[in-house]
Image (tube, coloured by chain):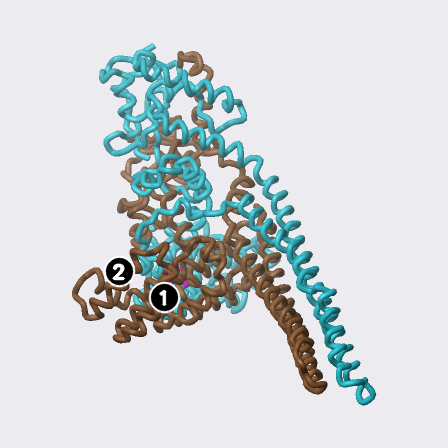
Amino acid sequence: MSSPMETDTQLPNGNSAGATAITPPSKLGKLADCLKLEHQFLRVPFEHYKKTIRANHRAVEKEVSAVISGVSDAADSDLSRDDAVIQLNSLVSRLQGLKRKLEEGSRTEHLQAQKCRARLDHLDSAEVDNLSEWNGIRLKRILVDYMLRMSYYDTALKLAQSSNIQDLVDVDVFHEAKKVIDALQKKEVGPALAWCAENKSKLKKSKSKFEFQLRLQEFIELVRAENNMQAISYARKYLAPWGATHMKELQRVMATLAFRSNTECATYKVLFEAKQWDYLVDQFKQEFCRLYGMTLEPLLNIYLQAGLSALKTPFCYEDDCTKEDPLSQEGFRKLAQPLPYSKQHHSKLVCYISKELMDTENPPLVLPNGYVYSTKALEDMAKQNHGKITCPRTGLVCDYTDVVKAFIS
Amino acid sequence: MVNKNNKSPKFKQKEIGIWPLLTFNFCTKTCQKCPPINHHSVFRPLHSSSAIFWWLSILSTTITLRSLSNLEMELNSIKDAFDRVTKKQKLSSSKSQEIIEQIGQEIEQALSRIQSGNDSASPSDHKLILNELKAKLKEIAPLSQLEGTQKDLNIALSKYPKLLDKSFNPDISKAYRNIDFDIHTVNQIIASHFYRQGQFDLGDCFVDECNEPEAAEKKAPFLEMFQILEAMKSRNLEPALNWATNNHEQLSQNGSDIELKLHRLQFVEILQNKGRDEALKYARAFLAPFAAKHLAEIQKLMACLLWAGRLDSSPYAELLSSIHWDKLAEEFTRQFCNLIGQSYESPLSVTIAAGVQGLPTLLKLMNVMTGKKQEWQSMKQLPVPVDLDREFQFHSIFVCPVSRDQASEENPPMLLSCGHVLCKQSITKLSKNNITRPFKCPYCPSEVEAGQCRQLYL
């Protein structure tokens, strides 16, 4: 094995040219690999479904226990007969209300379950034959995801509707986010705090400090308005519980009482800036995505980055880069600029004339001036020009018989 | 023998250390990914890290071959798991309904008893009934009943996402580089994607919503293109012909004969709809200028005149096929995009498709690189090749089979006299920098000289 000679001789010329053929790993394998990327696609509607189930269940529990305690209250207190009737009647109508609510809840649950199933079916429907259509839908899904995350709701909705892929995108999930984001942009923390309360246990599990940040901002707003006494009592009530884990931040914010909103001290000045609200919006988006099992970055950015890295070669930045290469476009070049170049372990030759990839069936030929073209392209040219070949890049004219084979592995 | 002398002792060890292992496991005839053990390993020591990556790429191929059937099975088991969730959910919800019903009935019974026991009953009767009701409800224990079904449901609910985590890549953002991805650029790319797909409403809506008015620049040329295509769909070639005439120079420079193809189609249309005289007039005016280059084609068209009115039963019936219209629309799109400096395929679709193909490899790489996140963020070139389908190959890339280096201007590919190709530096090494000293081609038994090697232009 240490002597290369022995094994070399076993390789006839044809074989080494055969290595030019890029044998793609089976198409099925690739398809399976790309389906495995669709975690979020199944996870998000499921989380939504789960949330509805839990909320409905909580409502039932709460109402039922309220009715039970209503009964025992009535039994324990000394009610007159008429009062007892009134009390029981109100409990009956309460139960009826709960029944209606439960029915409505089941309908929502059912719709959401259908959505989950539609996505499973959609993944199942991907076959090698319908791949281009399936990929088209995937691009649309990725675009809708991007728009929802960027709060371009109108376009997201329009794209989803016009392509009839409502079940495959998460417009409804983001509806919930929209309310909170809109409020935060108007500098209102109410809906965000309500959202935190609603998802308390999950946020706690992920050690989120989003609620704390909201509270800090509210405190800052009180200081800005010079409601110092109110600010202090607010801090006692809402900030103090976070002291154990976030003392540093708490201290810093408390110091604004001394510095006030017109301070020039950089450490505290920044706390009063309007961009803190933008920061809260970003923070909320992150928490929201985490909660639903979404990637923190838009899918579009993730796929774009991977694609740009895979496509990026030093040749992409040359002037004669083919227009078909996305990296010939200014925007794509700009995005790819900080990304790594791709790596090749095997030669890949693209014919300058036919733009086809050369392989064993269409091996490379060399003109006397060293320029390489595919056999098919040169054969066609020779047929049309009575056996003469004109090099499209140098203008050299030669006979087809002058070209030689090159073995490129 | 020359080759052997090139090796450093240190390398010899590595070669023995890594390659026999690989060979033993994977270098069977069916494994196409694994390189023949002889050449490159001899000339260049493999860095230990690249050996790991090689391992990885070999491993991944063997895994993917089996993975689809696995995934299909997994999808089925995921569906089953989901069915379990919905089943439990239905059970739980009907249980809730049942319990509410039961409580309601008990209360209503008590209510009617209180009301019916109107006058004859003693004043404390209703109290008794209330206490009975309380005891009854306690006996039913609705909350613990609810808890029971909820417990089952909770188990199903927590199992399902775990199954998803196991069957899918739970975090595809692992290979994401945390860099500033300029939002304006991304938005402009999306806007022009919509415009080039002919989705002008969507494009406008998007440009409006993301507030990138300059992205609308791309609209006008594509609007023109789709107007022409629309006209072609209703068999009106006028706008397309106008466009071709206006861009005559550039089109012929690009070697496109789309102008002739448009005129040919128009000629056949006229011949079919307006008769021989009109067609002849048209041919004289518009086809004649192409005679020099496309004589055979024009002769064929002229022969069609003989079958005016019954072209469908002529040897030229094929010219009437609607395929010509579809093909021409496609070629027109290609040429139009080319003239406005755009690609035929949407660059966004191409990049995303490449990303989908490349991402699995990058994610596997990240699994190997755990703890080296920093390295990943600053890497100038990916450490592993990302295999993309041939439609994503836009450039000729030569990788020297000996040194595994990518060819460059300083290190171009050279053709040996036996027909094998190596890059310049490898030849210099093999020939010990002596242009007349013969050396053995690493791929065949031929003896070659560096001086006779020719540079290749790919």
Q: Which chain is displayed in brown in the rendered image?
A: A
Type of amino acid at the residue the image marks with label 1: Arg
Q: Quadrant of the C terminus of chain B?
A: top left
Which residue occupies the extreme right position in the image?
B120
Q: Residue at x 65, y 73 (%)?
A: A67
Q: CA distance from mark 2 to mark 1?
A: 14 Å
Decide whether residue A80 is among the magenta residues.
no
Q: Is residue A10 above or below residue A170?
A: above
Q: Using the rendered view, name the quadrant where residue A316 is placed.
A: top left
> Which residue position is annotated with label 2?
A252
Q: Which residue does the image show at 27% across and 44% down from the upper left?
A: A318
The magenta segment: B190-194
Above or below, A324 against B432 in this view is below
Task: Check chain identity for marks 2 and 1: say if they share one.
Answer: yes
**Measured from the top left, where is residue A320 in percent x and y?**
29, 45
Tell me the residue that label 1 is attached to: A215
